[in-house]
Amino acid sequence: MQLEVGTRQAQASGTEPFRVMVVDDSAVVRGLITRMLEGDKQIAVIASVGNGQMALNALEKSDVEVVVLDVEMPVMDGLTALPLLLKRDPDLQIIMASTLTIKNADVTLRAMESGAADYLPKPTSTKDLGGTGAGSFKDDLIAKIKAWGAVRRRKPPRAKGPGGAPERAKISVTAPRPTQSLYSGKITLRPAPPIIDLPDVIAIGSSTGGPQALFAVLGTMKGGTVKQPILITQHMPATFTTILAEHISRLSGWEAAEGKDGETIRSGRVYIAPGDFHMVVENKVTEKVIRLNKNPPENFCRPAVDPMFRSIAAAYGKKVLALILTGMGQDGLQGGKVLVEGGGTLVAQDEASSVVWGMPGAVATAGLCTAVLPLPEIAPYLLKIAARR
């Protein structure tokens, strides 16, 4: 087997570049991704191969930290290769890259349930693949590689097993992961809500690492454990949000689906903001309804958490229980301020269990939260407030 190895040795002032392997059956796509990644001094592409079997062979010879893994490939596809790569190195950070189809979205989220770190939709044209700017494939991929490369490097070294391979336990999707910290301010907590004030709605915002965190929280809060509707904005493109809802239903027992414009909000259901639409709530006589819109992106995102939080605060007043999970940026901060000023309650995932402590770090250090908790403690806390358990 011959590997296509990046010719440029990345130099990052005082920091070793993150070591990446690109796996895609298209030589053109591999070349484009390699060149775009090697334009960043903090990334070095040390291997580029055409299928899962070649990736396994390359992993024997190369010290890889992050793998960009295509879904559909000959010989061995991405879903087949994933558990074999993780068996060889359980701390390997694997980002699934696939085109926007229902089939590929389903495979990608199944891969995340099986240990993949993240995903990124791959443009169908090579022209779009090389685009730049906020929300581009290039910028998103570079950001994810750095975030997950940092996660890899914060893991403790493991003893060597037979043949020199590291002995590492497989990581559960519910296990806390080290974080990429963006905030170092002091956390000041707000008082817990009065016991008589049961919330009428639960709202959740999440981004990078969010699907695994959502599976963990909602998997513990099984369908029927609370009566409130749950509204979720996860930064995801169209198609992927459809499949996310299906996976939440399967894993947790909740009745989950993308929100539909004009739909009446019902108790005990989960509503996911559809990709490329902001999802907000509107008062309509005696009921609350979902409204979808294509207003400009906020925080470079559509859907965004801020408009959802603002509308929920206006519709439900103080009877709101909101949660910010792991994610880049600070989406949810401005909406969280409105929500808390209206008497609502806000909870955030803590730094140690977040992949990126951007969104939760922003609200936590702004003094907006009643609690800042590790991932395994979030569902019990929400149940305590929402169901008095």
Image (cartoon, grey):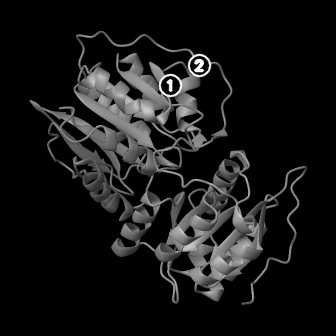
The x and y percentages for residue 357 are 59, 37
Quarter of the image for the N terminus: give it: bottom right
Would you place residue 331 above or below residue 20 in this image?
Answer: above
State the CA–CA distance, disc 2 to disc 1: 8 Å
Residue 220 quadrant:
top left
The label on residue 338 is: none
The label on residue 372 is: 1
Left or right, 212 with respect to 90, comes to left
User: Which of the two residues, 132 or 101, is positioned nearer the viewer here?
Assistant: 101
Left or right, 48 with respect to 189, comes to right
Who comes first in sequence, dot 2 or dot 1? 2
Label 2 crowd (10 A; few <14 / some 14-19 / many >=20): some
The label on residue 187 is: 2
Amino acid found under the numbered disc labelled 1: Val
Q: Are marks 2 and 1 in contact (CB under 8 Å)?
A: yes
Quarter of the image for the C terminus: give it: top left
Residue positioned 22% across, 26% down in the render: 200
Left or right, 136 with respect to 207, comes to right
Total residue callouts: 2
Residue positioned 75% across, 84% down in the render: 4
Amino acid found under the numbered disc labelled 2: Ile
Residue 227 quadrant:
top left
Residue positioned 38% across, 48% down in the render: 215
The x and y percentages for residue 112 are 46, 59
Label 1 crowd (10 A; few <14 / some 14-19 / many >=20): many
Kind of element beneath mark 1: strand
